[in-house]
Amino acid sequence: MKLAVGFLLWACAVAAAAGAPKPTAKTLNGTYEGLHLPTWGQDAFLGIPFAQPPVGNLRFRWPQSLNTAFDQVRNATAYGNTCMQHSSTAGFPSKIDEDCLNLNIVRPSTQTGHPLPVLVWIYGGGLVSGSNSDPQYNLSGIVRTAQEVGQPILAVSINYRLGLWGFLQSTQLLAEGSANAGLLDQRMALRWIQENVAAFGGDPKRVTIWGESAGAQSIGLHLHSYDGRHDGLFSAAIMESGGPTGTNLSPLTYYLAPFENLTRTVGCWTASDQLSCMRALPASTLFDANPSQVWNPIVDGDFLTAYPSDLTPQGKFVKVPLITGANTDEGTSFSIRGLDNATALFDALLVWRQYALSPASIRRLFALYPDDASTPKPPYAVPPSVSFDEFGTQWRRSAALGGDLVMHAQRRKMAEAYTKAGQPVFSYRFDTPLWNAAPSTGANHFCNVVFMFQNISGALGPLPAFESYKTLSFGIGRAYANFAATRDPNGKGMPALGASLPRWPKYSLARPTNMVLNSNGSFVEADTWRRDGMAFLNTHAVDRELLA
């Protein structure tokens, strides 16, 4: 198998495909012409709009459906714009712009005669960065893997507004019904897929939404949106390193001061209609005025009627088959450094935005996550007696707590809730550090993504011949293709995740298990580690404490 490279594979394929017939697809609005990729045996349709440009009077509002038709065939041969963001976009082959609500589609060129299951990627990046043109999210790798195993899929990647463009929060926006616009961008893309994917050979009845980090958080919120109302926009979900309860759903009051600061900075504070004033400004004015403020979703009483930690126990979530997982050493990415005693850690947890827990919760968590040299803590491959003094003596303790609070506990909570609801759940723990990871890093946040996309060479650059990496990566691709098609990762091309992989068992309340994805040989473990600590995190509605 050929691995995807870190550059746009489509850019390299254009010249090779110059004389080949270009694929077309007729949507409800008109016909698009894409690229044929002979090296991959695939067709790609890039930069297709799924909503009206969210500019001018539509800035900060929920997305609006496309309302025009066209007769001439339009090109879908280059990526569309990347959404506005302050993070580096040097590796993206598209410019940043407000007009960014577009998606990409990759499919096998050889049609099966049957509609293909659809896998929809929602990128992460803390809701402040990311793009469907990021080479790390190249769809051709997983589409090729699915082709080779005889379980072909059609893959889609979508854009959504980020930062203040997608998650500006204020009393006025809430009253207008425009809160959480970035999440509604995602939902609009899913509606477009339902209406149009059949024209590309996809099956709208078999759409799996798939995301990592903030992408998985978004999926968790979609699963709990409208009190769990099932609108048929998707029929399964894959959540990697994220979910609905481990991240900041801040109350609206938290954003009143940042909103005032923003409107004062751009000269709209005294305007009779502050939102109209800001909608009339050049995008560059807002971009320059808000480089560091983080905006997050809120409970708006519409899309989200309550905190997910309240909705989950009530069964108010969309019931669909689920793959959910997290990386072994998530905590090394979500820890507080430079602290050398318990008092310093206690004080930091009171005020640090990632946690901001109550004193009572911190005292209980300190008992459940003791400061001793015998208790395993991230990075787990390093003996617990080894300290990383350069990070502070409380760093490994903080990493254990942070990894559970932000990632592992909610993964277990979702697995339990969906199993209780009668849905098939397949849980994993990703346990393979990148080849050049420092000992203090371990299998940390985001290190799994290159494996999930079968993009090993492209993300890591020159790489030793780690056949074990390839075996693991392609095995995951096969599992995902099977899940997209049949709602079970077991099936064609399996077992293939390691030398001695058993079947990936369904999660069970009586015998909860994770598939441990390890390049030296994957295996099944009991999902019972740190049971008391995660039970506390999952039963005390920690998400409601954040910045309350």
Image (cartoon, rainbow, N blue to C red):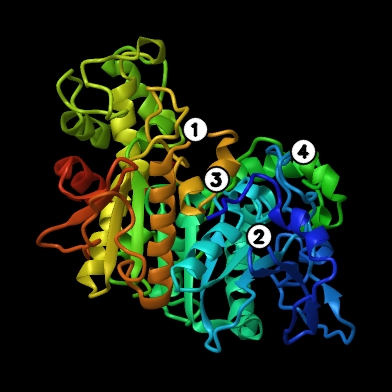
Residue 373 visible in this rendered orientation of the protein: yes
Give amino acid for label 1.
Pro
Horizontal side of residue 243 vs 376, given as left or right:
right
Horizontal side of residue 502 vs 39, given as left or right:
left
Residue 126 got which mark?
3
Q: Which residue is mark 4?
A: 289
Of residues 342 and 17, the one drawn nearer to the viewer in this rendering: 17
Between the residue at mark 3 and the residue at mark 1, the CA separation in whole angstroms equals 31 Å
Q: Could you say where residue 449 lies in the image, as x and y percent from the top left?
A: 49, 47
Q: Between disc 3 and disc 1, whose residue precedes? A: 3
Q: Could you say where residue 376 lies in the image, as x and y percent from the top left?
A: 20, 28
Q: State if disc 4 and disc 2 touch (CB < 8 Å).
A: no
Q: Between disc 4 and disc 3, whose residue precedes? A: 3
Q: Which residue is mark 1?
A: 464
**Nearer mark to the viewer, of 3 and 2:** 2
Between the residue at mark 2 and the residue at mark 1, the CA separation in whole angstroms equals 33 Å
Write the residue at 30% across / 67% down.
Answer: 490
Q: Which residue is mark 2?
A: 159
Between the residue at mark 4 and the residue at mark 1, the CA separation in whole angstroms equals 45 Å
**Nearer mark to the viewer, of 2 and 1:** 1
Write the residue at 60% across / 60% down.
Answer: 140
Horizontal side of residue 8 vs 144, given as left or right:
right
**Nearer mark to the viewer, of 2 and 4:** 2
Of residues 465 and 541, the one drawn nearer to the viewer in this rendering: 465
